[in-house]
Image (cartoon, grey):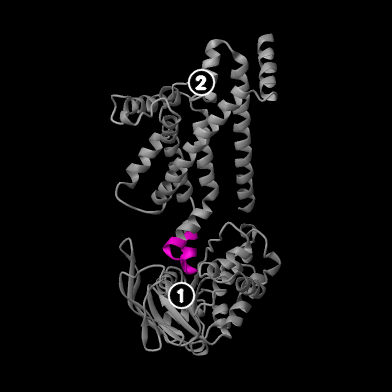
């Protein structure tokens, strides 16, 4: 049974300022969900709470497998993974960075090598396998971050602006890697971006956030052709000033 | 000027001929300082790590205390330890005064705040994103802590080396609690002080050269480690 995520009425304040207001959504099938919205709409906070990196002030985040609710412990954390906008590379080689998640799971050396090589090939970094990770360019760093998260084969992968400020070449490589991952029917990808074209290219389902609320959502084609919310319409047609 | 040159020549001769008295002093110095450093690292590294990683009441006070104790005057430490270890002191029954054990204790007290404080600094300067990255990849709290310690390894090493520098160069405390007894508690620094007083510069210079050489070797090793770390960054 693959892992499903349900968010119920979550709210979050930072220094008394509401960032999320009563957000609910059920990510009940695999595929790519794209969270869109203007700056400060609460997308990243929503993602961090879903990925269990932060706790909501109120509301609930639940993971389920079939009809069973999954306990929020290390075992669950090992079934999900989050790629942050700032990757946080370990001061070691590219290989060891990617192998980290497998090593802490006690996997055997041979299997680690095979899986790391496969992940590095997917993001086009196999030739930098033995390089020091901190010498990589920002595009390569982002690709390494994705390889590091996907090598552990999570059931839900959270991506927070994976291509922000990257050149077109790196963006294409990352998008191709995400598309390849989509081939895995068990995987759910929940991704934040405010690149409308990228959302159109990748999303199965789009969620539009505005002022801490999910104000619109729908399948890719339906959302972009006929957004239900006026703010979503203004955003995707480039009329929203923010 | 001639006497200085003559002193240097005799000093090199002592080193070259592996003078037994000289070797005994060097061996004892390394033993006392080495044990003191091992003890202060065993206590200081975990202590500095816990203070760096955990938030608890009184944490700020402990950090201030450690920073203050980094500059502890050795003679004051020697004096307090003397009062505690002397026959009429609370630990006088242990008979530790004027023994290498008392010297190790004094040097541990001096090195511990340096090791713990610099280790704490190394831990808190690790980017918090590293801990978050570890968690997002499925690390347990313990594995996350190990990852942060690993990232701080060069800073922790600097703390240990700084502690070693402190104990190797120390003279005041060990002179008071060790007594500078020939063949028993006489180490490099106390010998240099004594021989200089006596006007016997050869042995003092020989030991000074060895001390400087050891210091140079340690610093070169540290530099190589840090350079390796910086290249990685």
Determine which residue is flagged by label 2.
B182
Give the percent coordinates (x, y) of residue A107: 55, 71
Residue A165 in sight here: no
For residue A37, the mark is: 1
**Element marked by disc 2:** loop
Residue found at x 36% / y 39%: B64
Q: Residue B160 colored magenta?
A: no
Q: Quarter of the image for the N terminus of chain B: give it.
A: top right
Residue found at x 44% / y 25%: B178
Report the number of discs.
Answer: 2
**Viewer-side residue, B70 vs A57:** B70
Give the percent coordinates (x, y) of residue A204: 52, 86
Residue A133, quarter of the rendered image: bottom right
**Viewer-side residue, A76 vs A150:** A76
**Direction from residue A155 to residue B67 in the image, left or right:** left
Residue A23, quarter of the rendered image: bottom left
What range of the chain is rendered magenta?
B129-143
């Amino acid at each position: 049974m693959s892992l499903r995520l349900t968010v119920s009425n979550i709210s979050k304040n930072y220094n008394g300022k509401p960032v999320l207001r009563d957000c609910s959504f059920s990510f009940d099938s695999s595929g790519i969900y794209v969270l869109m919205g203007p700056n400060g709409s609460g997308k990243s906070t929503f993602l961090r709470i879903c990925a269990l990196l932060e706790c909501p002030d109120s509301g609930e985040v639940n993971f389920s497998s079939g009809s069973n609710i999954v306990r929020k412990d290390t075992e669950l954390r090992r079934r999900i993974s989050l790629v942050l906008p700032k990757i946080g590379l370990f001061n070691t080689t590219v290989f060891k960075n990617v192998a980290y998640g497998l090593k802490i799971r006690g996997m055997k050396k041979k299997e680690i090598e095979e899986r790391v090589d496969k992940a590095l090939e997917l993001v086009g970094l196999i030739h930098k396998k033995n390089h020091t990770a901190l010498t990589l360019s920002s595009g390569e760093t982002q690709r390494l971050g994705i390889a590091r998260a996907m090598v552990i084969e999570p059931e839900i992968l959270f991506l927070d602006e994976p291509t922000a400020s990257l050149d077109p070449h790196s963006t294409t490589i990352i998008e191709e890697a995400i598309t390849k991952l989509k081939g895995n029917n068990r995987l759910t990808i929940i991704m934040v971006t405010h690149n409308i074209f990228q959302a159109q290219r990748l999303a199965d389902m789009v969620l539009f956030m505005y002022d801490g609320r999910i104000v619109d959502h729908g399948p890719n084609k339906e959302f972009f052709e006929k957004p239900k919310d006026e703010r979503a319409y203004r955003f995707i047609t480039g009329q929203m000033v923010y | 000027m001639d006497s200085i040159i003559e002193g240097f020549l005799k000093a090199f001769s002592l080193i070259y001929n592996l003078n037994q008295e000289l070797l005994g002093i060097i061996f004892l110095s390394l033993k006392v300082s080495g044990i003191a450093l091992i003890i202060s690292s065993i206590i200081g590294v975990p202590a500095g790590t816990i203070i760096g990683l955990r938030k608890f009441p009184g944490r700020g006070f402990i950090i201030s205390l450690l920073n203050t104790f980094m500059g502890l005057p050795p003679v004051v430490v020697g004096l307090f330890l003397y009062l505690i270890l002397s026959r009429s002191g609370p630990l006088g029954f242990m008979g530790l005064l004027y023994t290498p054990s008392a010297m190790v204790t004094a040097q541990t007290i001096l090195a511990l705040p340096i090791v713990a404080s610099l280790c704490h600094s190394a831990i808190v300067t690790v980017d918090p994103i590293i801990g978050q990255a570890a968690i997002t990849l499925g690390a347990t709290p313990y594995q996350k802590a190990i990852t942060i310690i690993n990232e701080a390894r060069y800073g922790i090493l600097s703390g240990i080396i700084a502690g070693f520098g402190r104990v190797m160069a120390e003279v005041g405390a060990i002179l008071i609690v060790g007594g500078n007894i020939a063949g028993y508690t006489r180490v490099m620094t106390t010998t240099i002080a004594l021989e200089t007083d006596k006007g016997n510069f050869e042995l003092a210079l020989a030991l000074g050269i060895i001390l400087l050489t050891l210091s140079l070797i340690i610093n070169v090793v540290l530099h190589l480690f840090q350079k390796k770390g910086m290249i990685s960054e």
